[in-house]
Amino acid sequence: QVGGPLVAMAEAEQHRIYPGKSTYAMRPVEDCVADVLRLTGGPLEALSCPLVEAHGRLLASDVGAPAPIPPFPASIMDGFAIRSGDGPGRFPVDTVDGVTAGAASQPLPPGHVRYITTGARVPEGADAVAKVEDTREVWEDGKLLIE
């Protein structure tokens, strides 16, 4: 399935059609945590309170769900759904419009990739998601490939 607003935008503006690549360097998580602790005075003491007084407070420990939420494999990032068995290389984007959260998805054919947004169901056949930041768009013979 080719077409849609993303293709029209790419043809009109001749630039990246997939969002998500930042011009800023990533910082290590440890540095960010150290900054937060330095600027806030460190961790706070835990306390218990009735639920009606809990508004505006933070949990001191994790709360587990009795069942998986959502009840399907979901992407935790914007990227491209892939079949890891296909290995590295250039692969055609099988649906330029991609998969967004809440949308139905068709199985991913071997040798293809599909754009996917955070929270969207990982298509059947895909077993991984490559981050947008780790990919490169390549146009060959008028077709979009992801490397």
Image (cartoon, helix red, strand yellow):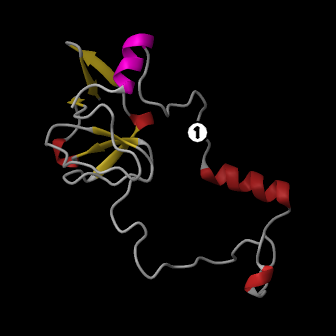
* The quarter of the displayed image where residue 143 is located: top left
- Image point (21%, 54%), residue name: 124
* Foreground of the two, 40 or 129: 129
Q: Where 86 falls versus 49 (above or below)?
A: above
In the image: residue 113, left or right of residue 52? left
Q: Residues within 10 Å of mark 1 (few under 14, many from 20)?
A: few
* Residue 55: x %, y % from top left: 77, 73
* Residue 119: x %, y % from top left: 43, 53
Quarter of the image that includes the N terminus: top left
* Residue 81: x %, y % from top left: 30, 45
- Image point (69%, 77%), residue name: 60
* Foreground of the two, 88 or 129: 129
Quarter of the image that includes the C terminus: top left
From which residue to which does the magenta span run?
A: 5-14
The residue that label 1 is drawn on is: 26
In the image: residue 133, left or right of residue 61? left
Does the segment drawn in magenta span residue 137? no
Q: Callout 1, which amino acid?
A: Met
**Magenta part, dominant SS:** helix
- Image point (13%, 42%), residue name: 110
Q: Where 106 falls versus 96 (above or below)?
A: below
Disc 1 element: loop
* Foreground of the two, 105 or 118: 105
* Foreground of the two, 107 or 89: 107
Pick out the residue farthest to the left. Answer: 110
